[in-house]
Image (cartoon, grey):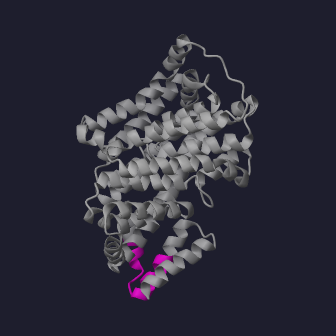
Amino acid sequence: MTTTAIFGSLVLLMLLRVPIAVALGLSSVIGLLMSGISLEIVTQRMFATNNSFPLLAIPFFILAGEIMSTGGMSRRLVDFAYSLVGHLTGGLGAVAILGSSFFAALSGSNAATVAAIGGVMNQPMEEKGYRPQYTAATIAAAGVTGMIIPPSILLILYGVVTGVSIADLFLAGLFPGILICVSLLLLNRYLSGREAIERTDFQGASEIWRSFKRAFWPLLMPVIILSGIYGGVFTPTEAAIVATLYGLIVGAAYRELTFSSLGKAFSRAVLSSAVVMFIMNAAGVFAWLITINQIPQNISAYLADVAGSQIVYLLFVNVFLLVVGCMMNAAAAIVIFTAILFPAAMSFGIDPVLFGIIVSVNLSIGTVTPPLGVDLFIASAITKVSIERIVAAIWPYILVLILDLLLITYIPPISLLLVQIFG
């Protein structure tokens, strides 16, 4: 009865379009009342959820991404990407995708990536003659790399929930992120051939070198962060603070980071961090409640029995999380459903690092899938294109992302090779 009340109230509140954090909190309160547990536990579990040193990485990486965007670094990364691929068929679409991958290595956030690169690329693609819905779909799909390429906020959350090494997760996310970037570039080349866009002449190696020099310091940031983590110089949380300080120094050196723009960057970072942490707090209470009611254990045992094999179980996980990602915020989903799916994955001998990448890729695809794909709404706000038109144009990208997901799921070395070598 309690289980039905918990999940039934959550589904009902989501259908009523109640914000996910509030829906999780209210359904948790209903479950606590039906279980006869004092509501004092709500504040205790919220505090316990926040009382985690690795979680400090999230607000600092969000702030670092905002500073990088405000300080002119996103435009320099786009210019460098343009010198590399701007002359190809669908050149500006390729620039948006490659530029998003570069920026993902700075911000760790899909939303920040779509907002930053979309703000730079929307007008040039429109002036070049790209259809508005194609521009919006490409910008939204390119943002998926922000949740996979390290430092990924989603991978940090998974590491906090499961206790898996965040450094190993960062390492494992590199090749899947590159795979997704390359596949999106190939699809863009094919689709843009039908756009009848005039190609731009190749500017030569001198232009690549010039734009590389302008983008050198932003490009150096992920190298410093990742080498520092794997060299044992600092932890992922300390790396987030280093990234923030690095962004401040580089932005000041470029003389594009004013006190006014810095204040706006801090304001946006505070709001984004508050949203993530509020969701984490409510999801933490919800996850604790279902755990003490033995719901994850029972579901995990049932899934392990029904699936029967690792291959079938991973297929089930992919289908299930693709559906969840369409309807629920990724941060909340990773806290709630990892608790349910992780034990069965371990019983099948699935590598916990690989499982984290699979979960993250699934939920990242959800950010571009209707009805609640957050990247769709951000791209719509930037390009002024309706959600319906973006959805009609983004399906080829979603299909390619699902193909990438299957490759990542069933070819473990894509994720684990670097971990096995350096982890």
Quadrant that contains the N terminus:
bottom left
Instruction: State the image coordinates of residue 45 (x, y, percent, origin top left).
Output: 37, 70
Specify start and end residues of the magenta stretch as a single range.
27-44
Q: Where is residue 301, by image quadrant? A: bottom left
The residue sitting at 25% across, 60% down in the picture is: 349
The residue sitting at 54% across, 72% down in the picture is: 23
Residue 35 as seen in the image, left or right of residue 257 = left
Above/below status of 248 relative to 111: above
Quadrant that contains the C terminus:
top left
The residue sitting at 27% across, 63% down in the picture is: 348
| The residue positioned farthest toward the top in the image shown | 206
Instruction: State the image coordinates of residue 46 (x, y, percent, origin top left).
Output: 40, 67
- Main SS of residues in magenta: helix
Above/below status of 402 relative to 283: above
Residue 187 as seen in the image, left or right of residue 283 = right
Of the pair 94 and 230, the residue shown nearer to us: 94
Does residue 318 appear in this view?
yes
Q: Is residue 36 in the magenta section?
A: yes
Of the pair 343 and 320, the residue shown nearer to us: 320
Above/below status of 24 relative to 184: below
